[in-house]
């Protein structure tokens, strides 16, 4: 089978809260335990669900977001992530047809399903309905004839009698029932202010939850029928995304491994968010990528010449991060040396003077604090000047997702000038530091990785 014909399913729902993550993660785990190599994907910018997907499959969870990366990159990124897989499972976002505000179907699950030519399995919360389920499914099946709604999984079914009523109603819908799952809280995943608690913070419990989900899926779903459906897909004509091809020759390194600049990437429970493609692009651009955990490591990796601190939950771990004074001092020293530092959201907070009064790295002249207000949504922005990450005039699309505020919200040299949905400046550029709330998917702007690594390489060469 060619890579373009990888079997695939999209797991969608009429609305958030129906059980997409439960079903998608359970299917990934069940098929993996059956011996298949399963490639996990998530529609949209969410970075928590892919952690559970990765735990279920043993492969990196990858995002498919047409707003962040462009519609034309969805299939290539999918094929890149699914290389060598026997099956790909794509978890949708929100309701099937919900996408970026005021942008029609852009970034919706339906759009991704159409681009991937993949059948959709609709997860329906059946807890408060019986015959009405058929009307609901009929509406979703007929709304967009280009979307192939090929099956339904009934979730939160109350009893044998309830399941019988639901199946009888569905008989007239023309859409087959491929599973029925009973109400069960045993495999629940705890939530907090920004959604599910990430895997990195509860790995043992998460493993148990994923195993339980797999068992529930095996018991309640027709796995052979789902696999047959996944195998009914046509071949995609696109070539897989290739990080080497994305970078211009001048941005690719031919240096020996010993001469590669070392880029340290923050991880661990406090910094759980990073798109898998970022590390791949950094490596192709010539970096040696080394992870470290700011909660545990008192030093940066030996020889660090650049730093990437992505998203996560530093506000939850502020006391522990603050207590690691040696690492905070090392980060501040690296930033003061002019080395390139890219910080997004959680990284921005970590570089500030404090979070809720707890001292942080002090690289930025700003204070962070938690609020009740959620800042969430897609953004468009432009680089106002040359910096370590982007050339002046570089236009990007990104995503904000936080309940913290930073005061002030921008420095004398802001990281970005926001152009949509409102106009404002945001973030900090100082020396080699680029820090912002904005999450940007580097697959859409691979030159960001090349620029960061080139800066680290120049500094390394200057220091001999």
Image (cartoon, grey):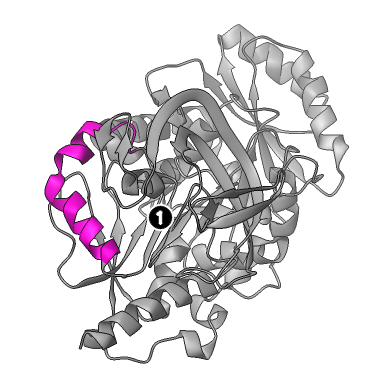
The reply, left or right, for residue 192 in relation to residue 41 is left
Specify the quadrant that holds the C terminus: bottom left
Q: Give the answer, above or below, for where 438 lies relative to 166.
A: below
Residue at mark 1: 343
Q: Position of residue 210 (x, y in %)?
A: 37, 35
- State the residue in front, 237 or 16: 16
What residue span does the magenta drawing correspond to?
314-336
Res. 34 visible in picture: no
Q: Give the answer, above or below, for where 297 lies relative to 70.
A: above
- State the residue in front, 329 or 146: 329
Q: Residue at x 62, y 12 (%)?
A: 127
Q: Position of residue 446 (x, y in %)?
A: 54, 72
Which SS class for mark 1?
strand
- State the residue in front, 84 or 433: 433
Q: Position of residue 169 (x, y in %)?
A: 77, 17
Q: Position of residue 121 (x, y in %)?
A: 66, 39
Residue 381 figure quarter: bottom right
């Amino acid at each position: 089978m060619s890579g373009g014909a990888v079997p695939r399913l999209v797991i969608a729902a009429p609305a958030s809260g129906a059980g997409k993550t439960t079903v998608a993660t359970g299917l990934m785990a069940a098929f993996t335990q059956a011996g298949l190599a399963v490639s996990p994907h998530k529609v949209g910018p969410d970075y928590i669900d892919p952690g559970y997907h990765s735990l279920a499959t043993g492969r990196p969870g990858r995002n498919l977001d047409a707003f962040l990366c462009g519609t034309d990159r969805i299939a290539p990124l999918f094929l890149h992530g699914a290389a060598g897989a026997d099956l790909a499972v794509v978890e949708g976002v929100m309701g099937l047809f919900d996408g970026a505000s005021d942008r029609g179907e852009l970034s919706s699950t339906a759009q991704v399903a159409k681009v991937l030519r993949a059948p959709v399995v609709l997860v329906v919360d059946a807890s408060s309905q019986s015959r009405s389920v058929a009307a609901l499914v009929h509406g979703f099946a007929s709304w967009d004839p280009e979307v192939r709604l090929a099956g339904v999984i009934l979730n939160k079914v109350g009893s044998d009698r309830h399941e019988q009523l639901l199946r009888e109603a569905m008989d007239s819908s023309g859409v087959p029932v491929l599973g029925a799952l009973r109400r069960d809280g045993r495999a629940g995943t705890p939530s907090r202010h920004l959604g599910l608690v990430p895997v990195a913070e509860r790995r043992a419990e998460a493993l148990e939850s994923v195993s339980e989900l797999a068992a529930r899926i095996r018991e309640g779903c027709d796995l052979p029928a789902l696999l047959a459906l996944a195998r009914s897909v046509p071949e995609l004509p696109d070539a897989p995304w290739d990080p080497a091809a994305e970078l211009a020759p001048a941005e690719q390194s031919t240096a020996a491994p010993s001469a590669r600049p070392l880029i340290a990437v923050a991880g661990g429970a406090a910094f759980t968010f990073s798109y898998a493609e970022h590390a791949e692009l950094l490596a192709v651009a010539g970096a040696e990528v080394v992870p470290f955990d700011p909660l545990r490591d008192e030093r940066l990796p030996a020889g660090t010449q650049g730093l990437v601190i992505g998203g996560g939950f530093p506000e939850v771990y502020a006391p522990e991060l603050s207590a690691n004074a040696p690492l905070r001092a090392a980060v501040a020293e690296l930033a003061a040396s002019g080395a390139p530092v890219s910080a997004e959201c959680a990284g921005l907070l970590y570089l500030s003077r404090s979070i809720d009064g707890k001292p942080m790295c002090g690289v930025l002249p700003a204070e962070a604090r938690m609020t009740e207000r959620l800042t969430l949504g897609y953004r468009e922005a432009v680089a106002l000047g040359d910096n370590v990450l982007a050339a002046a005039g570089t236009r990007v699309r990104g995503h904000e997702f936080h309940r913290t505020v930073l005061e002030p919200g921008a420095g004398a040299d802001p990281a970005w000038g926001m152009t949509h949905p409102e106009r404002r400046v945001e973030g900090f550029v100082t020396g080699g530091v680029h820090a912002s709330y904005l999450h940007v998917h580097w697959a859409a702007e691979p030159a960001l990785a090349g620029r960061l690594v080139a800066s680290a390489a120049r500094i390394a060469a200057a220091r001999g």
